[in-house]
Amino acid sequence: HAFQKFHDETGRDIHGDGQAHWELVKLTEKLLASALGASSARVVMASAVGGQDIPLGDMLAMLDQGTQADRFERHMLQSTLENISQGISVVDHDQKLVAWNAAYVELFDYPPELVRLGVPISQLIEHNILSGWITGKDPSDAAARRIEYMKTGKPHYYERQNPDGRHLRIEGNPMPGGGYVTTFTDITVDKERERALIEANETLEE
């Protein structure tokens, strides 16, 4: 499918016994690297260019190593997210959820079946409107603005008070490749200290 797409977009020949175009060679190595890793992909490409076949057992071993490495990276990412006190959500370029942590789920009291890989972030925001977390004259307009920030890759920062009285600092930033990460920090203690300081200053003035 990738080769056919390459042909449709460039008009380059993808069949025959002639020398492959360098762009096709580059694409092939990129495809292999996504499954095998960059170093293994170079081994396969070098063998192919040299007219040598790689034994099936060796190829399966490379695939297994690539899968294990990918699984390890995902495990490390999730472990890192779970050890951060902030609520974190990450969406891809289609504004679909690809990563999150338990603090994020607990913060919004999401049902377990709602938070899953690939769910549109719009569904989660809709839940926030129905649960009263997003309030105001026009909650749907506020939700649309947040999604627009993600689509256009514009950073945003604001503070708000939850219906349960907690204060949150919400910060969103674009990621390379079109993704978007949003962090939710509980700043209730900071707000209480700020209010106490203001009251103390007022008392001193009196």
Image (tube, rainbow, N blue to C red):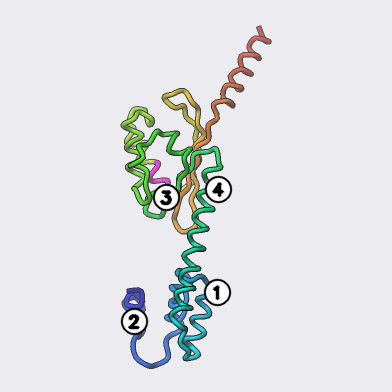
Q: Nearer the viewer, mark 2 or mark 3?
A: 3
Q: Nearer the viewer, mark 3 or mark 1?
A: 1
Query: Identity of the amino acid at label 1?
Result: Ser
Q: Nearer the viewer, residue 88 or 202?
A: 88
Q: What residue is shown at x 46% (from left), y 83% (from top)?
A: 55
Residue to which mark 4 is pinned = 80
Q: Which secondary structure lies at badge 4?
A: helix
Q: Which mark is residue 39?
A: 1
Separation of disc 4 and disc 1 at Cα? 26 Å
Residue numbers of the magenta segment = 146-151
Q: What residue is shown at x 47% (from left), y 77% (from top)?
A: 29
Q: Nearer the viewer, residue 143 or 70?
A: 70
Q: Is residue 181 left or right of residue 127?
A: right
* Residue 62 in the image, given as x and y percentages of width and height: 49, 73
Q: Nearer the viewer, mark 1 or mark 2?
A: 1
Separation of disc 2 and disc 4 at Cα? 45 Å
Q: Quadrant of the C terminus?
A: top right
Q: Which mark is residue 11?
A: 2
Q: Is residue 146 above or below residue 174?
A: above
Q: Is residue 5 above or below residue 178?
A: below
Separation of disc 2 and disc 3 at Cα? 34 Å
Q: Nearer the viewer, mark 2 or mark 4?
A: 4
Q: Which mark is residue 91?
A: 3
Report the magenta stretch's main SS: helix
* Residue 93 in the image, given as x and y percentages of width and height: 40, 55
Of callouts 3 and 1, which one flags the residue occurring earlier in the amino acid sequence?
1
Q: Is residue 181 part of the magenta span, yes or no? A: no
